[in-house]
Amino acid sequence: MNKKDAAKAIGHIPSGLFIVATNVGGKKEAYLASWVQQVSFDPLLISIAISKERPGYEEILSGSLFTVNVVGEHEMSYLKYFWSGYDPSDPPFDKIEHSLTEAGGIVIKEAKSVLECRLKEKVHPGDHEIIIAEVISSYTLNEGASIKVHTRPSGLDY
């Protein structure tokens, strides 16, 4: 198998874009994710691939509540704060309009929808953890917005 050719084909697999966010003790962290997928109807479960370098990694793996903000085509200006990461001394939530759920989950106002989740299990098959998370609650914010679909030039990079 030619790895470069395989990686090009893998890059053609479409995904959405998501902001995965934690809020533990008032410390708000988030990262841009594209490897998110539903894996069960009952209970409602999703999978997320996450690198240990991502903001909120420790909090998610500790079992803390987190949110998955689904990016819509209608408004994507807040993505610039997450595309290349951010300086912890300049937190993005000082600039992005958001609210908190009763449980403390971060809801980005311009997201299409938001899933509030908690870790159920994890596996480590390669250079990312795959977490399975149970959806605890959800919020639809911009019903008519189209979901942002993302493909990559290569499966060897984000």
Image (cartoon, rainbow, N blue to C red):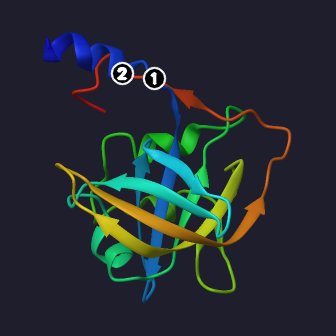
Residue ID for mark 1: 151
What's the residue at 45%, 24% (across, down)?
A: 13
**Mark 2 surroundings: few (<14), some (14-19) or many (≥20) residues within 10 A:** some
Quadrant assignment, res 4: top left
The vertical placement of 55 against 16, above or below, is below
> Could you tell me residue 75's position as x and y percent?
67, 38
Res. 41 visible in picture: yes
What's the residue at 54%, 45% (across, down)?
A: 78
Would residue 50 be found to the left or right of residue 36 on screen? left
> Mark 2: which amino acid?
Gly
Res. 56 visible in picture: no
> Mark 1: which amino acid?
Thr
The vertical placement of 127 against 7, above or below, is below
What's the residue at 14%, 14% (across, down)?
A: 1
Is the Cβ of the residue at disc 2 closer than 8 Å to that at disc 1? yes
Residue 11 marker: 2
The vertical placement of 126 against 77, above or below, is below
> Could you tell me residue 10's position as x and y percent?
34, 22
Would residue 93 be found to the left or right of residue 146 on screen? left
